[in-house]
Amino acid sequence: MNSNDRNFQAYLDEMNIITILLPLSYHHGSSSTFSISDESQKVTTLQIIKKQQIENNNKYICRLGEEISFGHPYWIIDEHGGKTDLQIGAVIRTESFDERFFYDGNDLGVSFMENQTQFKLWSPTAAQVKLKLRKPNSTFSEIIKMRREEKGVWSVLVHSDLELFQYTFLVQVNQEWRESVDPYAVAVTANGELGVVVKLEKTRRQKPFLPPFENPVDAIIYETHIRDFTIHPDSGVKHKGLYLGAGELNTKGKDGEPTGLSYVKDLGITHIEFLPFNDFAGVDETEPNKDYNWGYNPLHFNVPEGSYSSNPLDPYARIIELKQLIDNIHSQGIRVIMDVVYNHVYIRETSSFEKVVPGYYFRHNELGFPSNGTGVGNDIASERKMVRKFILDSIRFWMEEYHIDGFRFDLMGILDIDTMKEVRKTCDSIQEKTLIIGEGWNLNTPLAMDKKAIIRNQSKLPDIAQFNDKFRDTIKGNTFYLYDKGYVLGNEHYYVEAKEVITGSVGIDKEGSGLLSNPSQSVNYVECHDNHTLWDKLLSCLPDMDELLHIKYHRLATGLIILSQGIPFLHSGQEFFRTKRGDGNSYKSPDHINRLDWNRKQLYSDNVNYIKGLIQIRKQFPCFRLKTGDAIRNYIQNLPLPIPLIGYSIQNENHDIREVLLLINPTRSKQSIQIPDGKWSVLVDDEKVEISSKQLVLGKEMVLEPVCLTILAKK
């Protein structure tokens, strides 16, 4: 029945409740009775329990005597003999629907048996589902009917080896046919237009042994984008902008020094975090140099992006090349964090989710409209059972198939706590100590506050780390006010917060008074792919200052990331003052804005070596990696220095160095201070880092250089 042929509309809104809308232009919107009829012509009267006028319609709420059988057509008949098809309405967002149709099998998508290929799709509200198959290099399609099984799963077994066949599903819901790519597709054609049948076992590699990783605070994260990482003309990389390029080893810049992956290894990084590399919209894969995108427009969650592949037309190329990249990173003893975007899809109406089970996968507000906490027009309803299952299945897939070591959850605050707890369990069942970090921002999505995976609910997510925006804004100044100066820029208003965030945001003076419970929950950063780089903020905040002072401020902020309690997070190129030429939202800006400029590494090699030295200090001294809030309160003591100077004495247990002093002077003048008695080695000052320093400070007094981090150590 075409929507234009309907005199009125009827929706199944609960398992036994039907909502009927009669336009006032149709018999004045009036009917004293309604009945329901099925394929067998059996007619049952509905009980009208409420009637009200809404705009140009009368709305009738009716009760069904018995539940309907999903997947079969029904008609609603009014007293005038008018007839309309019963459409699937808000019932899909009820708990009873979730209970009835939750499918716990692990065989959705495509699976193989000997010379047989099986396709399964979860689509409980569909009346019919067909498989559309196309041979490789052919325009001819074969349509095969699928059979409805338990829990709303549709299935067909084709007695043939269909490797490299292209496929989609044709799904009929509410009398309308839609063509959809398989939500569980693991391979697609260029630009994700069709699913492709592939044999992943052909692409599998053995995961190499990685050095032990005990606690999140042992991580040093380096965030980059596969294209940005190598696309610069002087990157020294052959396969620029591609998976293959990001995995190249022993590449060198114009100075003959390492670039790319070998450089990251040399810097001392433990985890590389890549911006999304699942299949996304915004770049034409057949012309990858034409457009640029960060990748937060997810199309297919279990397929690698094709624009980073050497041949987007070959469905296997992107799979093999991504696996090779991950393998090469692992060969350097570095782990891979995948940036995942399970909070929204690119366009709700055209997504596989919406075509296969309309309305189910997305949250709706009290008026029945899709909610928009993400700001892109849709929020994934992670609290629904089959949505949660999809996320968990996807996480498992990336870990088992691609050997991913950790996940960064984009807009994690859209997701619910129970889903994130299940993510933690799933990861631990495959690889303990998997690093999970997320953006726990509180966004306006219709989910109860106590169920959101946000920072204020961190105590319910003890094993998931949160991006610490309090650290970011305290140290450098508010991210959303370009001219706001933070603690390191000499703003004393941030002094109290600075003392708190440097010591892990756990409540240094009193348990329970901090933002977080343990330092392993705090991702400490001052810049990432989003917003202005720190260098660009400094140029805006302090435009008349000479570059030397910009360098000192930047070095102090980056040094505090590395030496504060928690998990240090560096934006790639931050160590050589990455600039995006003032662009504060470069998600689709061209390469010359986004690329990593490897010539700056040469230009600012002193700073690179300084940051490299701080990373070594962090790794060498356990006192900069305390694992619990209690340890921080027990081992760190505040030194009574004049505001805005900050000083801490930190006990360094089970080490030949027994005590370390961390001293911070954010002012532009030298400061004379009192320090505890003893013979102190100077490990770090404003210019150099030395793990075994011969420079000593004796007695009770010393002078701190302007805008400077100082570390003293005592045996």
Image (spheres, rainbow, N blue to C red):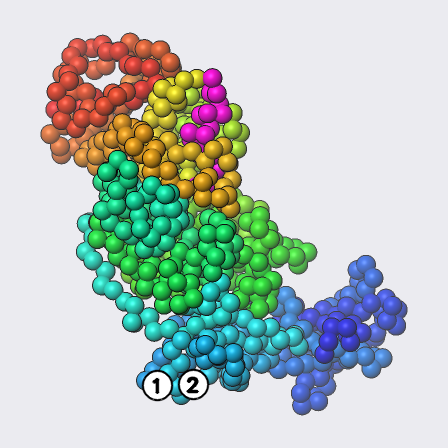
Residue 215: image x %, image y %?
Answer: 26, 45
Query: Looking at the picture, which amino acid does disc 1 mark?
Result: Asn
Residue 73 can be seen in this image? yes
Q: Looking at the picture, tell me which residue is in the foreground, 399 or 161.
A: 161
Q: Looking at the picture, tell me which residue is in the foreground, 682 or 516.
A: 682
Which residue was labeled with disc 2? 158
Residue at 33%, 26% (x, y): give it. Answer: 555
Looking at the image, tell me whether mark 2 or mark 1 is earlier in sequence order: 1
Few, some or many residues within 10 Å of mark 1 (<14, 14–19, 20+): few
Residue 58: image x %, image y %?
Answer: 81, 65
Residue 633, numbered label: none
**Residue 448 colored in magenta in the image:** no
Query: Looking at the picture, which amino acid does disc 2 mark?
Result: Val
Which residue was labeled with disc 1? 115
Residue 200: image x %, image y %?
Answer: 33, 70
Few, some or many residues within 10 Å of mark 2 (<14, 14–19, 20+): few
Residue at 85%, 79% (x, y): give it. Answer: 80
Quadrant location of the C terminus in the rendered image: top left
State how many labels appear: 2
Residue at 48%, 20% (x, y): give it. Answer: 543
Query: Which region shows up in magenta?
Result: 529-544
User: Is residue 348 shown left or right of residue 461?
Assistant: right
Residue at 72%, 69% (x, y): give it. Answer: 19
Secondary structure under the numbered disc 1 in the rendered image: loop
Q: Are marks 2 and 1 in contact (CB under 8 Å)?
A: no
Position of residue 476 relative to residue 412, above or below, is above
Residue 336 can be seen in this image? no
